[in-house]
Amino acid sequence: MTPGELGPSYERVLVERKRDAALEAAADKLLHGESPLEADIFRRYGVDGLILDGHFGAVPIGAGGEGGIPFTEDSFDHKKSSKFLIRGFIPAGGGISLDGEPIYSDPPILPGQTCGNTPYVGGTQSVCLNLDTATLQQYGLDGTKVAIALIDTGIYLPHLTRQLGSAPSLDIAESWTPPTLATKPGLHRLGHGTMCAFGALIAAPKATLLDYPLLLSRVVGDHSVAGTVGEIIKGYWPLAYRWRFGSLGTKYDALVVNNSWGIFHPSLDYPLNDPRRFTDNPLHIFHFIVNGLILLGMDVIFAGGNCGSECPSPTCIQRTTGTIMAANSYQEVLTLSGCDINDQRVGYSSKGPSVANMFQNKPDLAAYTHFLGSMTLANYLPDTGTSTASAVAAGCAAALRARLPASTATPAQLFKALKQSAQPAGPPGYDFEYGFGIIRPVAAARMLGLIP
């Protein structure tokens, strides 16, 4: 049975389950990009009104998220994990517990969008001048031996090659494609993911891209391009496993994870105060998984959102306050606002404070957007949204990591330097439009002792 056949009376959820051989087998299939449909798990766990999504598989989550139990480095090892996450559907308004195990919401997510009706402001060269990429490259801060994972709609490498004049580095072996997709790494349809890949390479031209087209993955019966929280979790796990236990961690000195997506409106989620809720719930399992990535030394970066009061995206449904929500508001990640090349915040960039119950002081920084760059749609349309700002910031982080391996500085230390070295947009200090200011990677490099 598919979600389409179930209808709106059913809600999609993520459920914790205790370890057994079937869960481990399903996880192993997922890790290798294989369909988990034939695993025993999907004949054994359809209980208590839970209708399982056979395409999701099983994701190891260590001791689980109940009670705020922290992840450890071994939490992503499916051969050691005591709990796994599966996905299914329950009747709307039903109970909030299955066999006593925690369950969590799995609302839709969308890539960042913009109102899109204003001309571009400047181009890639202007962004390079503002970021002073020439100085970065002079001191070897160019992304060498650093991987950037694009959690997005996929990369179309031929277009990037045409725009850049030469092929950027794409590690196909370390990229991961959901089992439901037929296209291969670097050959997904041209769009949002390619735009973000271009932005990330501005400051880090020698970084290696990892293609994780998680926003294209579909559940049974869902024919939209929107991803879900569960799809991101499912893709985060192979990334974490390869970084911690596989060859990814031996190939590269650092790993930056760019997330140019987010929740646009709380109506996509469970009601307020429901423990399954994602939007404003710091105890959602997604938060623990993100913390797991950071524990492993990954620099996790998020777009702030496009619900600014002057020009909100239509998907915001006119909500312009408390619009930095869910993962985009986690204190541990770096959250980006957007500004143009004249250092003016763009009108659609979400303002803080974040949604209630979450870390309030978001965004953290501003980075550049709305410039003529990748030309993924047309040769006169800008790269837009805080999606682009997040990708540009991810490139800045990757540039610095070329001489600041993950083994020598934590994500918190890198982010602290980026915040303290930012160019204030007004009086010194924090504000809810620019965060600590506009990103200045050269100033951060000096603060970190990477250049004189």
Image (cartoon, grey):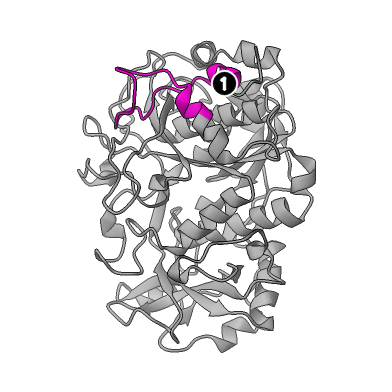
Instruction: Identify the secondary structure beneath mark 1.
Output: helix
- Relative side of 82 to 403, left or right: left
Q: Is 35 located above or below residue 422 in the figure?
A: below
Q: Quadrant of residue 368?
A: top left
Look at 57% across and 21% down and name the residue there: 447
Q: Residue at x 65, y 15 (%)?
A: 451
Q: Main secondary structure of the magenta part?
A: loop
The answer to whether residue 276 is above or below residue 377 is below
The answer to whether 161 is drawn above or below residue 313 in the figure is above
Q: Nearer the viewer, residue 293 or 265?
A: 293
Q: 245 or 2, which lies in front?
A: 245
Which contiguous range is marked in magenta?
Answer: 417-446
Q: In the displayed structure, does residue 290 sit left or right of residue 10? A: right
- Residue 390: in magenta span: no
Q: In the rendered structure, does residue 438 fall within the stretch colored magenta?
A: yes
Residue 67: x %, y % from top left: 44, 70
- Mark 1, other Cα within 10 Å: few <14 / some 14–19 / many ≥20: some
Residue 203 lies in quadrant = top right
The x, y position of residue 171, in whole percent, is: 73, 41
Q: Position of residue 442 (x, y in %)?
A: 57, 17
Whether residue 235 appears in this view of the structure is yes
Is residue 443 depicted above or below 302 in this figure?
Answer: above
Q: Is residue 173 visible?
A: no
The residue wearing badge 1 is 447
Tell me if 163 is positioned left or right of 418 in this view. Answer: right
Q: Amino acid at mark 1?
A: Met
Image x and y of residue 249, in percent: 75, 47
Q: Nearer the viewer, residue 184 or 387?
A: 387
Where's the C terminus, which quadrant?
Answer: top right
214 left or right of 238 in image? left
Q: Residue drawn 49% across and 62% down?
A: 230
